[in-house]
Image (cartoon, grey):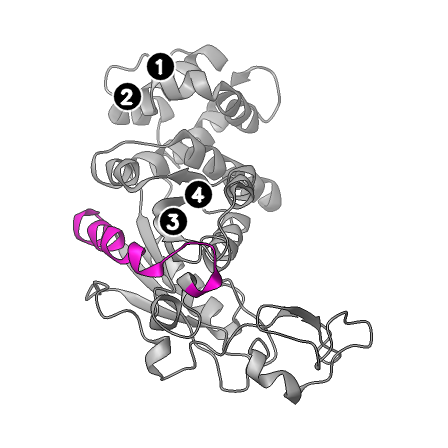
Amino acid sequence: MALPVENGDPSLFLIKVLPGFDVKKTFDYEQFRTLCVRLFSEYEVEQDEWRVREVFELFDADANGVLDNQEIHSCCNWIHAIVNPVNVLLVVDVQNDFIDGTLALRKCGFGQDGLEVVQPINRLLKEGRWDKVIYTQDWHPENHISFFENLAMRELHPKSEITKETAKPFDTVVFLQPHITQILWPKHCVKNTWGAELHKDLLIIPSSERVHKGQDPDKESYSAFEDAEGSLKLKRILSAVGATHLYACGIAYDICVKQTCLDCLRLGYPVAVIEDCCRSVKPDSETTTTYIENGALVERSDRILSLVNDGKHSLVMAHQAAKFINQTKLHIM
């Protein structure tokens, strides 16, 4: 994405994107705070002023309490991504086997039903102004290491507490080669089968992309970034569209959605998790805490639609973006 003020006057850029904003020669924290109130809201700034302070300090490279011209340039590039977002929706693993098939969430015993995500996600797809929609799919070979039915194919490590004789679906074992700890899931989402297909009632956007994961027989790939082939494709798509903000929903909130989102955050993308468009294998507050502690926004779909449709902005996502801009700048230097 082109930098909006690379050779221009940052003051003019600020006035253009925030009409009426008074750009003073001394751009200190108080003026930056006023800018953030314009970008977000007084309420959000008051609730999370520590984020505002941290973002200011990230741009204030010389720590003198004032942003000089070069530092304001960096700040303006941050603002440009906020007010001109490229929004990508990740629809994670809304597949038959997780809804009605061998690994249906309602069979896991914690009161969740994968079917309940389909209509809320369809609403997002119909009403949201998405620059790109990406559907991910578990896409396993028949001999995948995660299948309980394939336990006999590989040796367990001598220190595995669960043995082949005592193992049951959903137990955790340790394999000898490859030496990994693995939950034994019922066989699911075998490539080119009904179970691996997206649910028939899920709306498919014509210009969307699909990313397959879990294709290595000896590796579990909960995240869409963990599968070598799928990761390359996903990164290429995000780069091609110039993605600035990622929004995630689907199945399961505590496994594949979580791991994909954590990898997105590690790559520097601002991420929002749409909680009413997700369901879990085992719902608990710990998963939400993990999202928040790693920098993700966790919100319901009404709030998300206001962000992508109505020109609203999230301070949480902007905070994540500023950290990435700062890390990139340090890497270049």
Q: Earlier in the sequence, mark 1 or mark 2?
A: 2
Where does label 3 land, which residue? 246
Where does label 2 land, which residue? 15
Q: CA distance from mark 4 to mark 1?
A: 27 Å
Say which residue appears at 57% left-offset and 75% top-offset: 146
Residue 68 makes an appearance in the image: no
Q: Which residues are magenta?
A: 107-129
Question: Is the magenta region chiefly helix, strand or loop?
Answer: helix
Q: Are marks 2 and 3 in contact (CB under 8 Å)?
A: no
Q: Nearer the viewer, mark 2 or mark 3?
A: 3
User: Circle 1 — which element?
Assistant: loop
Q: Are marks 1 and 2 in contact (CB under 8 Å)?
A: yes
User: Circle 3 — which element?
Assistant: strand
Amino acid identity at mark 3: Leu
Which of the numbered marks, if any, corresponds to residue 23? 1
Q: Nearer the viewer, mark 4 or mark 2?
A: 4
